[in-house]
Each structure stands twice: as structure tokens, then as C-alpha cells.
Image (cartoon, grey):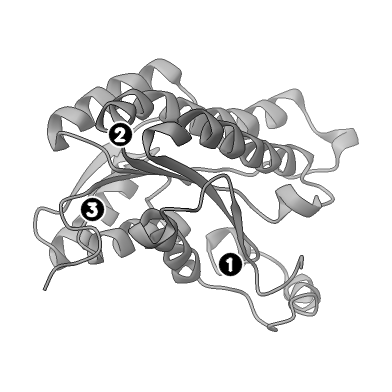
Amino acid sequence: MSKRFDGQVAVVTGAGRGIGEAIAKKLADEGAKVAVISRTEANAGKTAEAINTAHPRAAKAYAVDVADFSAVQELADVIFRDFGKVDILVNNAGVTRDGLSMRMSSDDWDVVMDTNLKGAFNFIRAVQRPMVKQRSGRIINISSVSGIMGNAGQANYAASKAGLIGLTKTIARELSGRGITVNAVAPGFIETDMTNVLPENIRTAVVGRIPLGRFGVPEDIAAAVAFLAGSEAGYVTGQTLVVDGGMVM
């Protein structure tokens, strides 16, 4: 029985854990070959090994700092040599350096912007020419509800995620004539290492603001990505799909 992404190649950044790991596994479960990318070889290798256990030879692991433009270009060349093409790009890599703006250092601002926003641009630059030549492709950027509503203590993170939405719309317009769609997914509060460290009183307060009354799970985001990457979403581009249990509706 054929699967949704049979014969397709996906690149997923920040795939060593959490949401990125769930996305990489979901796409592999649906038949894609996956380039699993993380900052460290250990994290990328862990996800790729799990995928290959379920789907032999479906994944390869790569380590790169997504903020390093030249390193990303070099890695893209390797991925194209290893897989031959890229059909799906998921820009998920992200970091936080939270703090009130009056105390936020220049370094904390730069690290978050360089990873979350510039990192996505770097990978888009690296894959868009081959996608244009093949006249098909799906680019999906993982934004955040923080980029839509703002969040005290996250000036850098919210700005980077809002920037991703603007980047998504612009690249969607630039590539729409070549059969390439570009969309964003904006997760709300998802059960990951990043949210597991929240104090219980904060978790309780957050859940109180979510109409569905719970945090999401990484698989919720993976399902949204799979929809946008599939043929069913062929007429959807430049959009931000909010997956947040209704928090910012």
C-alpha cells in the first residue's frame, strides 16, 4: 500500500528532540526519506536511529549550526548528493533566551534571531533553486503563538517567530509560480523539554487560558506539518496554521 510521501525527501531542522523529532518520525512513517538535522551529531543520530529501526535506511543524520550561512550551504550540497533532491523543508530549529527586554543582552537577542529566523532563511536559500528547477516543493516554517500575540519576557523569541511569518508570506509570493508552497505552523504550549521546566503554578495558569484545557503534544504539530506537506494542501500557501488548543483565537 502506497504512503503519502513515498519517493519524497524531507529535510527537518531541530529534529534531535521534541517537535522536530516528532515531525521527522511522522514524515518517515508516511513514506519520506528524511535528512535529520540537529546542532549535535548525538541528537541527530538518536532520531535517525529510531526512524531507521522502524523504516530501514529511511533517515540520515547531520549536524550543523543553522545560523552559519556557509555551513548550511555546504550541508545542503551533501544532502543533495546523498538523496538526490529535496521535496519538503521543515524549518523547526529554535532556541530561547528569555528575559525582560530592559535586561536582555545583545548576545541573547542575536543568538535567538540568528537561530530561529536567519537559520530558516539559510535553509530556504540552500534548497530553493533546486526546488524551482523541479517546479515543486513544500517549505514549512515552525513559528509560535508568541509571534502572533507577543509574550512578556520573550522580546527576542516573539520577534523571531513573527519574522518567520513575514518570511513565510514573502517566500510564498516569490515561489508560487513554480509549484512551491510556503506555509507556517504556529504551535501553542506543547509538552516538550522547553515547557516541562515550567513551575506548576505557571503551567496551571497557562492551561487556564487554553479553551481545550490542556497542553498539546509534539504529534499535534507533526500532523499539521504533514497536512501542509501533502498534496491535499496544494492550494494553501502563505498561511499560518495555529495549533494551540484555541488559546489565541
First in sequence, mark 3 or 2: give its number: 3
Around disc 1, counting alpha carbons within 10 Å, would you say few (fewer than 14), some (14 to 19), or many (20 or more)? Answer: many
Q: Amino acid at mark 2?
A: Arg
Q: Mark 3 = which residue?
A: 48
Image: 12 above or below 125: below
Image: 122 above or below 43: above
Q: Amino acid at mark 1?
A: Ile
Q: Secondary structure at mark 2?
A: loop
Question: Quick check: 204 left or right of 29?
Answer: right
Question: Quick check: 199 left or right of 33?
Answer: right
Q: Nearer the viewer, mark 2 or mark 1?
A: 2
Q: Mark 2 = which residue?
A: 135
Point out the residue furthest to the top here.
70
The residue lying at 34 percent from left, 49 percent from top is 43
Count of numbered labels shown in the rendering: 3
The residue lying at 25 percent from left, 32 percent from top is 134
Q: Mark 1 = which residue?
A: 190
Q: Quadrant of residue 86?
A: top left
